[in-house]
Image (spheres, grey):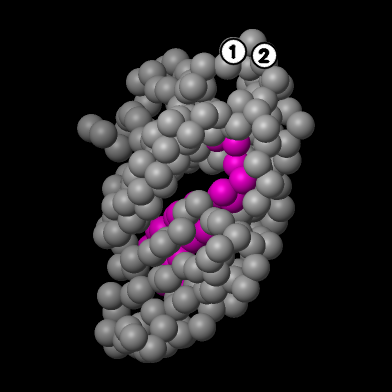
Amino acid sequence: MWMNPTTVPRARLQRCGVKTMSHLFFSALLHLIGCLLTAGALDISDVTLINPDPVVSSAISPSLLCVSSDWTTSGTSSLSLGHEPLDHEVHNLRAEPDRSRHAAAKVTWMSRNHTFGVFYCHVKNSNGSKIYTYKMLSEASFLPESLTVTVNEGEDVNISYTRKTDLPEDTVIFKNGIYEHSSVKEDNADMVHYSITNAQAEKHAGIYSIHYISGTPFSSAITRLIVRSKIFLL
C-alpha cells in the first residue's frame, strides 16, 4: 500500500495503530453480544453479530457473522443482514449459512467494495431490535477512540479520533452523511475532539465520520453516538 510521505512517525503509528486496532475489535465484540442500547431503551436481543475486522485491510476477506439463539430453526432462514451506507439507501445482504453453527448467517466479501459503513442483523418478522456494527477501511487517516459512544440526554460528550496521518489540510466531520463541523489545518494535535453539550436524542444521536477535506466518505473513520432519552431512565 502506498504510504504518504507526511505519514506520522513509527512510534505514533504503533501507539494508535496496533493498540487501537485490538481495542476496536474487542470494542465491537463487547458492544454487540447480548444486548443493544438504543435511543429508547435497553433491548435484549436474541442474535449475536460478530465483526472480526472492523478495520478492513487489503490483506483479508472481510466478513460478518450473525448467530441466532433460536434452536427451532436452522441455517439462514430466520436471519436478515443488511448494510446502511452513510449516503445510500439501506439494502439487504446475501448471506450463506455457517455450517459450524445451528442457526447462523455469514457474509464474506471477495473484495473491499461495499464494506464501509453501518451493518446490522436481526430476526426476520420479529419486533426485536437490530444489532449494529461498523466497518471502515484501513486507509482512513483517523481511528475512532470508540466505535460506539453512549450518553444520557443532557450530558456532555466528546467524540474523539486519533490522527493516523498528518496532512496540511482542514478536517471535516459529518453526521449521517451531512456536514457537521470542520477544524482548520493548524489544529494538528494527535487527537481530534468533537464536543457536544447537553446531548439530545433527536438532535445528536447518529453516525459521525471524519476525514481530511480532500478525502472521500470511504476514507472516513466512524463512530456511532447513542443518546438515551430521559423518559426511559425513570
Q: Is residue 116 left or right of residue 16?
A: right
Q: Is residue 113 left or right of residue 126?
A: right
Q: Quadrant of the C terminus?
A: top left
Q: Quadrant of residue 34?
A: bottom left
Per the rendered image, the range of residues in magenta is 117-142
Q: Residue at x 51, y 83 (%)?
A: 96
Q: Residue at x 46, y 59 (%)?
A: 53
- Of helix, strand and loop, which one carries label 1? loop
Q: Residues within 10 Å of mark 1 (few under 14, many from 20)?
A: few
Give 50 or 78, whichever is nearer the viewer: 50
Q: Quadrant of residue 139?
A: top right
- Where is residue 85 shown, x and y percent of the image? 64, 53
Amino acid, disc 2: Val
Q: Residues within 10 Å of mark 2 (few under 14, many from 20)?
A: few
Amino acid, disc 1: Asp
Q: Which mark is residue 184?
A: 2
Q: Residue at x 27, y 84 (%)?
A: 71
Q: CA distance from mark 1 to mark 2?
A: 6 Å
Residue 232, placed above or below residue 156: below
Instruction: Reply yes or no: does residue 86 show up in magenta.
Output: no
Residue receiving disc 1: 187
Q: Are marks 1 and 2 in contact (CB under 8 Å)?
A: yes
Q: Is residue 208 left or right of residue 121?
A: right
Give 161 or 166, whichever is nearer the viewer: 166
Residue 187 visible somewhere in the drawing? yes
Residue 101, placed above or below residue 65: below
Q: Is residue 58 left or right of residue 34?
A: right
Instruction: Give the number of callouts.
Output: 2
- Of helix, strand and loop, which one carries label 2? loop
Residue 42, placed above or below residue 169: below
- Where is residue 203 shown, x and y percent of the image? 53, 28
Residue 6, placed above or below residue 98: above
